């Protein structure tokens, strides 16, 4: 498996990061990063969103917030956008880093998924990372392992 700049897993994590900061990291099971990005997004919003927008949200729900957000200054929109953009970039890079880490080296004795390269749990019959059933990758019946018959090896 060769690492590249484009990974479905990393791209999906970045897409989830667009939805809300930290969500892509949850998908990647990077729990501390997810909590940190979620917290940063909340703190940034609490610091820069005007009190009038919070009041509008409390009184009219999401419609009030959308209406109030139309009057946000460039600084407010910029700071919220920077946090979101950096989160998306971090989710993407974290996904790529995880993919590179799962590429099996020749001296690695850990069982890896043939589909995504994730570390396998011996007790499961599917990959806990990509949910691929491992029975799909079993040896075909026409390829038999070498065994001994009457003391002589045969195929």
Image (spheres, rainbow, N blue to C red):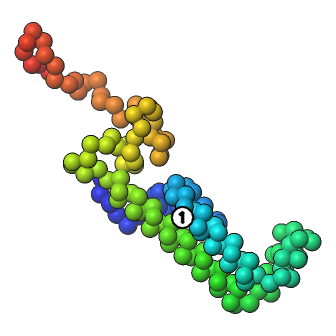
In this rendering, the count of numbered labels is 1
131 or 55, which is in the foreground?
55
Query: Badge 1, how many Cα within 10 Å: few under 14, some, many 20+?
Result: many
> Above or below — where is 83 with respect to 94?
below
Q: Quadrant of residue 64?
A: bottom right
60 or 33, which is in the foreground?
33
Q: Residue at x 46, y 58 (%)?
A: 8
Q: Work out which quarter of the rendered image holds the C terminus and state it.
A: top left
- Compared across the picture, whether 44 is left or right of 109 comes to right
Q: Label 1: state its secondary structure.
A: helix
34 or 84, which is in the foreground?
34
Q: Position of residue 67 (x, y in %)?
A: 84, 79
Q: Position of residue 68 (x, y in %)?
A: 83, 81
Q: Residue at x 23, y 27 (%)?
A: 143
The residue to which callout 1 is attached is 33
Q: Residue at x 80, y 84 (%)?
A: 50
> Above or below — where is 44 with respect to 115?
below
Q: Position of residue 46 (x, y in %)?
A: 74, 77
Say whether residue 2 is visible.
yes
Which residue is the extreme one toward the bottom? 74
> Above or below — where is 134 with respect to 99?
above
Which residue is the extreme one toward the top? 150
Say whether residue 12 is visible.
no
- Compared across the picture, whether 62 is left or right of 23 comes to right
Q: Residue at x 35, y 35 (%)?
A: 137
> Above or below — where is 61 with respect to 109?
below
Which residue is the extreme one toward the left? 152
Q: Position of residue 102 (x, y in %)?
A: 35, 53
């Amino acid at each position: 498996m060769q690492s590249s700049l484009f990974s479905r897993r990393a791209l999906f994590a970045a897409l989830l990061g667009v939805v809300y900061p930290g969500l892509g990291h949850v998908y990647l099971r990077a729990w501390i990063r997810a909590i940190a990005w979620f917290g940063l997004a909340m703190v940034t919003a609490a610091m820069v969103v005007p009190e009038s927008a919070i009041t509008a949200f409390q009184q009219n729900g999401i419609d009030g917030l959308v209406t109030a957000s139309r009057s946000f200054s460039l600084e407010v929109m910029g700071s919220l956008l920077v946090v979101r953009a950096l989160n998306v970039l971090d989710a993407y890079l974290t996904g790529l880093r995880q993919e590179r880490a799962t590429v099996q080296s020749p001296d690695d004795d850990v069982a890896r998924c043939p589909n995504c390269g994730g570390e396998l749990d011996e007790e499961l019959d599917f990959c806990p990372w990509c949910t691929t059933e491992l029975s799909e990758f079993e040896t075909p019946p026409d390829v038999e392992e070498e065994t001994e018959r009457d003391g002589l090896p045969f195929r």
